[in-house]
Amino acid sequence: KAGVTQTPRYLIKTRGQQVTLSCSPISGHRSVSWYQQTPGQGLQFLFEYFSETQRNKGNFPGRFSGRQFSNSRSEMNVSTLELGDSALYLCASSLGTDQPQHFGDGTRLSIL
Amino acid sequence: GEDVEQSLFLSVREGDSSVINCTYTDSSSTYLYWYKQEPGAGLQLLTYIFSNMDMKQDQRLTVLLNKKDKHLSLRIADTQTGDSAIYFCAESESNSNSGYALNFGKGTSLLVTP
């Protein structure tokens, strides 16, 4: 069974640009969550989707947005990139509410 | 959410047991989790324990849960150099929309020396 797949693995952008990251969950998993990992702040929750609906959102500015498609695949978008957005962005999927989450290898985003 | 606390660093000799401790905050967590992260990789779900259990054993891994003290520990028996990694403790938090999120500790860096 394939795991959680995130693309691309690495991205380099400049300040002010926008970026879209993609996540394909484990087959049959309907919940997809996104997390940001930085050395200073650690792992922080961004948002969670289930059946194309955002059910939970972390404390991030509106520049961070996401969506989920009918096949459970998810994308997150960051607009007007700032230097502080440099991080490893991790996607996780699970069967449903409060079920163990399985993570992908992440997308490492570097802002110049 | 509130802080999940872990010690930041642990060093053990190969073949010894490792014990990583964690204190969590959300008493309503259904599960409590241990994840492992190796350099350049994502998080690997190592093990998890249902909140109404006291102990779970899975091969070399033993998880102990003390709900009264909100204390979780991970014991790795016969620690190997391949166990060197960062270990994260996590609790789950739910909201009124049936949404949920994992709240992580800062991670414990485990160094296993030959």
Image: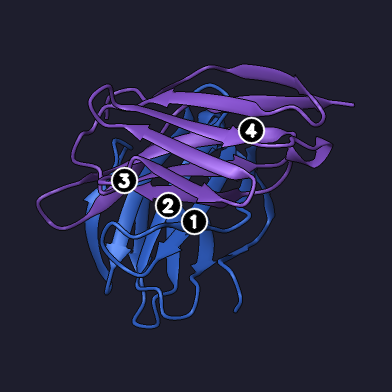
Q: CA distance from mark 2 to mark 1?
A: 5 Å
Q: Where does label 1 land, which residue? A: A91
Q: Position of residue A85 (x, y in %)?
A: 52, 36
- Chain A: give its colour: blue
Q: Earlier in the sequence, mark 4 or mark 3?
A: 3
- Chain B: give its colour: purple
Q: CA distance from mark 4 to mark 3?
A: 25 Å
Image mark 1: chain: A
Q: Where does label 3 land, which residue? A: B53
Q: Classify mark 4: residues with Cα within 10 Å, few (<14), some (14-19) or many (20+).
A: many
Examine the rendered structure and indicate whether residue A88 appears above or below residue B59: above
Q: CA distance from mark 2 to mark 4?
A: 20 Å
In the rendered structure, the answer to whether residue A33 lies left or right of residue B8 reads left
Q: Where does label 4 land, which residue? A: B86
In the rendered structure, the answer to whether residue B83 lies left or right of residue A7 reads right
Q: In the image, which disc is placed on residue A34?
A: 2
In the figure, residue A80 lies in which quadrant?
A: top left
Secondary element type, mark 1: strand
Q: CA distance from mark 2 to mark 3?
A: 28 Å
Frontmost of labels 2 and 3 is 3
Q: Are marks 4 and 3 on the same chain?
A: yes
Image mark 3: chain: B
Marks 2,4: beta carbons within 8 A? no
Examine the rendered structure and indicate whether residue A6 appears above or below residue B54: below
In the rendered structure, the answer to whether residue A40 lies left or right of residue B16 reads left
Frontmost of labels 4 and 3 is 3
Residue A63 appears in view: no
Marks 4,3: beta carbons within 8 A? no
Quarter of the picture containing the C terminus of chain A is top right
Frontmost of labels 2 and 4 is 4
Marks 2,1: beta carbons within 8 A? yes
